[in-house]
Image: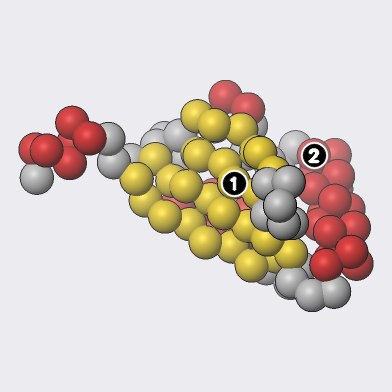
Amino acid sequence: MKYLVEFWPKEPWDENLKKGSEIEAERRKKGVIISEKETVFPIHFALSDPRGIEIIEDDVKMSKLSKWFKAYSSVYNVKITPLISRVEFDKL
């Protein structure tokens, strides 16, 4: 299973975007990140509003996603949606 991760900053946007970048920098420094190889679709940002999306590979454990979410929960709203392929869906 893959996961669609959507995130957008809480208000005040500018302040929380900055805090989110600081959290990310600290996590990268510690090596506690979801790596590029664990993503199917890397982080992309919408130009219309402060929102980002990413698709995480199915071998990432939900506990890792939960830890990721917890680290950012004070500054971002996050929605994690499980995804299945059309082939998998047709088998249901």
Residue with the most extreme left position: 91
Residue 56, x across and y down, in percent: 50, 39
Q: Residue at x 69, y 44 (%)?
A: 45
Residue type, mark 2 in image: Arg
Which quadrant does the N terminus fall into? Answer: top left
Upstream in sequence: badge 2 or badge 1: 2
According to the image, label 1 marks what residue? 53
Q: Foreground mark, 2 or 1?
A: 1
Residue 70 visible? The answer is no
Residue with the most extreme top position: 37
Q: Residue at x 57, y 54 (%)?
A: 6
Q: Residue at x 61, y 33 (%)?
A: 42
Is 3 displayed left or right of 7 in the figure? left
Mark 1 lies on a secondary structure that is strand
Residue type, mark 1 in image: Ile
Residue 61, x across and y down, in percent: 45, 45
Q: Residue at x 48, y 57 (%)?
A: 80
Nearest the viewer among 77 and 62 is: 77
Mark 2 lies on a secondary structure that is helix
Q: Are marks 2 and 1 in contact (CB under 8 Å)?
A: no
Q: Residues within 10 Å of mark 2 (few under 14, many from 20)?
A: few
Q: How many marks?
A: 2
Q: Residues within 10 Å of mark 1 (few under 14, many from 20)?
A: some
Is 25 displayed left or right of 48 in the figure? right
| Rendering quarter of residue 78 | bottom right
Give the number of the disc on residue 21.
none
Residue 44, x across and y down, in percent: 66, 39
Residue 62, x across and y down, in percent: 45, 52
According to the image, label 2 marks what residue? 28
Q: Give the distance between the C-alpha atoms of the residues marked 2 and 1, in whole angstroms.
A: 19 Å
